[in-house]
Amino acid sequence: MSKEDKPLEYERRIQDTKSVAQRVDLDYLKRGNRFRDLRRKLTWAAPLVAMIGVAPFLAGIGGGEKIFSNGAVSRSHAMFESNCPVCHTGVFTSVADAACKNCHDGPPHPAKAIDTGKPNFELRCAQCHLEHQGSALLAEVADGNCTVCHDNLTANAGNVKLAANSVTAFREGKHPEFAALKLKDGRALKLNHAVHMPAQPKTIRNIKLPMKCGDCHTTDLNSPKGDLMPVSFEQHCRECHRRELEFDVYQALGAQSAPAPHTKDPEAIHNHIVTTYQNALAANPFLPQRALGRDFLPSASPAAWLEKVVRDSETFLFERKCKYCHEYEGSLGGYPVVQKVAPIQGRFAGAGQPGLPWLVRGEFSHRAHRAMECASCHTAAAASKTTSDVLIPKMADCEQCHGDSGTHLDRCAQCHQYHNKAKETDKDRRPVDQLIGYRREGS
């Protein structure tokens, strides 16, 4: 390669800091820049505009306080939605219990009088009843508000006398079985559900079986929860069991035979039998000439005939017919006294005494379940042969719809009261403007 063909050598420019600094324009800060100037102005203007805009809301001018609302209030408190100070008595503070008690008495928890436990700490209203959650009912508290204490009652409360001290959900292993299922129904009646509801249809005394639950168990239309009316002989049993009141053991009366009255007074039954035979004897004086039962000879006199038919008819009625359904408790005037069964709803507590509900710590509404067939829940009824059987549903029967449906049907508050409504008092009535905090113009 010739000398002319060789590439030229690159000579690096030697630079120092001084030569570099001379190339920098030091006057750029002095020249105007619209973006930098705008940013500087916004830095001062934005906070000023924010302060001016917030001032009316802080002062409550023109309903401006709504900007701070967490959301719509519940349906029960809709009247207060535009007047926050009715509940929020302090600025930027949670609602105090005293504000709630202006309208509500704040009945204590636990709700049932039979419960003896007392929480180890004070419970605030707003802990469980969360407002500004939309139009939902405040009474429908979340399960977490219950289980936070009930998962370990002995640690969170004192004087607890419950067999199950840990309840976390309505499911097996997390909720106790209904205690009433371990009890016996003590009412003095002989009732056999299996006879009334046989598996195979049949006809007895022109009565078609099986019967339906609604033939005897009817709903009280005046009850908000659709409680069942007590079963009574006159309304539910007489149509089929009128023969259990027949007393004419010798069939001496014929068409004149009338059943004895269904009453707890044995003297009234005795008088009815005597009067019936006396009237029959007066209508037909030849009745004593007929042999009675296995006697081959007629009665010696009308008085002897009357004495015999009355005595034997009473024995037949009291010893065979009444015992078909009833039990006795002592005697009165030589006659057995039927053990009284007061019309009750729930447990039998004694003659004339109202019984406790089978679910003493829970609430149940037949009206809410009116679309369901009775046997869907009362699964043990068809096979029950004794009155002592408690035929309320088991927890497993309820779990078909409750406990794991993922809806509000699973909530504790659906079946359990958490406030003792009996402790509420009738507070003094107040004008509307005092209640809601203001009076509308023109009213």
Image (cartoon, rainbow, N blue to C red):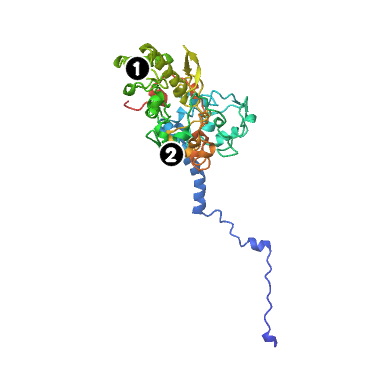
Read off the residue under disc 1: 289
Q: Which mark is residue 51?
A: none
- Depth check: give the residue in front, 340 or 167: 340
The three-letter amino acid code for the residue at tag 1 is Gln
The relative height of residue 195 versus residue 186 in the rendered view (above or below) is below
Q: Amino acid at mark 2?
A: Glu
Instruction: Where is residue 303? Give x, y as percent.
Output: 37, 11
Q: Position of residue 30 (x, y in %)?
A: 54, 53
Q: Is residue 3 above or below residue 116?
A: below
Whole-angstrom CA distance, mark 1 to mark 2, is: 58 Å
Q: Is residue 51 visible?
A: no
Report which quarter residue 174 is drawn in: top right
Q: Quadrant of the N terminus?
A: bottom right
Dot 2: what SS? loop
- Residue situated in front as seen by the camera: 402 or 389: 389
Residue at the image point whose x is 42% and y is 27% from the top: 231
Q: Residue at x 46, y 26 (%)?
A: 324
Residue most extreme to the bottom: 2
| Disc marking residue 373 | 2
On the picture, is 170 further left or further right than 58? right
Say which label, 1 or 2, has the lower sequence index: 1
Neighbours of disc 1 within 10 Å: few (<14), some (14-19), many (20+): some
Residue 65, compared with residue 230, is above or below; it is: below
Helix, strand or loop status at disc 1: helix
